[in-house]
Image (cartoon, grey):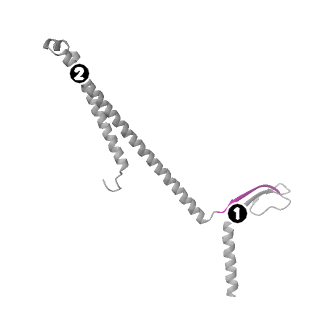
């Protein structure tokens, strides 16, 4: 008696496990009167079959594998976005540094130009008085160029700090 029960349980388990891996089919058909049926049983021989949809059943293992693949794709996308953001941050830092260097070079040129202008037109008190407005204008241009260079240096420093922070993020909970 026990062997029959065990055999029946084994057959049922085998049937359930093979049924889970089998494909399910949904039939759409019409009978001779024109009535539409949608069933998982095959249609009779005289029926007009409209459609058969086959869908394979997904096992829990396949579901977990698909979820893991989805998570891996999401992780890869987020890593690619992080890398892209990091490259953009580094590019901004490089550009800001180049702009600062250019601004410093222009400020140096303008300062040198102002000194030459003062030397050329301010070598005597009468000439200094005669060209004082032009001399002052050149000195103001040089001062404005130095101020712009300082702002560019500050922007480059901020971009550099941002890039450094992006390269070495502080762990959560630490300031």
For image coordinates 67% across by 78% down, the residue present is: 10
Residue with the mark numbered 1: 23
The structure residue drawn at horizontal position 70% and vertical position 84%, both measured from the top left corner, is 4
Foreground residue, 100 or 37?
Answer: 100
Q: Nearer the viewer, residue 144 or 128?
A: 128
Picture quadrant of residue 60: bottom right
Provide residue 2's location: percent of width, then percent of height: 67, 87
Few, some or many C-alpha atoms within 10 Å of disc 2 (few <14, some 14-19, many ≥20)? many
Q: Residue at x 69, y 81 (%)?
A: 7
- For marks 1 and 2, the one nearer the N-term is 1
Where residue 87 sits: x, y (%)?
42, 44
Please tell me whether residue 50 belongs to the stretch shown in magenta: yes
In the rendered view of the protein, which quadrant contains the N terminus? bottom right
Check disc 1 and report its element: helix, strand or loop. strand
Residue 167 locus on image (x, y percent): 37, 49
* Residue 148 relative to residue 44: left or right: left
Residue 94's disc is: none
Residue 70 against residue 86 in the figure, above or below: below
The CA span between labels 1 and 2 is 87 Å
- Judge from the rendering whether residue 93 lies leftward or rightward of residue 22; answer left or right: left
Q: Residues within 10 Å of mark 1 (few under 14, many from 20)?
A: some
Q: Which residues are magenta?
A: 48-57
Q: Is residue 44 above or below residue 138?
A: below
Q: Residue furthest bottom?
A: 1
The answer to whether residue 36 shows anywhere in this view is no
Instruction: Read off the residue under disc 2.
Output: 114
Q: Main secondary structure of the magenta part?
A: strand
Front-most of 22 and 149?
Answer: 149
- Looking at the rendered structure, the secondary structure element under dot 2 is helix
Whether the magenta-drawn stretch holds residue 52 is answered as yes
């Amino acid at each position: 008696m026990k062997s029959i029960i065990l055999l029946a349980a084994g057959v049922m388990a085998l049937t359930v496990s093979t049924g889970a891996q089998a494909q399910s089919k949904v039939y759409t058909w019409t009978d001779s009167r024109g009535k539409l049926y949608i069933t998982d049983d095959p249609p009779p021989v005289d029926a007009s079959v409209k459609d058969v949809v086959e869908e394979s059943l997904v096992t829990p293992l396949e579901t977990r594998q698909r979820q893991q693949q989805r998570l891996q794709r999401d992780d890869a996308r987020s890593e690619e976005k992080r890398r892209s953001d990091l490259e953009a941050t580094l590019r901004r830092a490089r550009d800001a540094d180049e702009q600062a260097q250019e601004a410093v070079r222009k400020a140096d040129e303008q300062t040198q130009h102002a000194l030459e202008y003062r030397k050329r037109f301010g070598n005597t008190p009468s000439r200094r008085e005669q060209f004082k407005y032009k001399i002052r204008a050149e000195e103001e241009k040089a001062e404005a160029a130095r101020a712009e260079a300082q702002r560019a240096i500050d922007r480059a420093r901020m971009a550099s700090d941002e890039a450094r922070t992006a390269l070495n993020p502080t762990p959560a909970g630490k300031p």
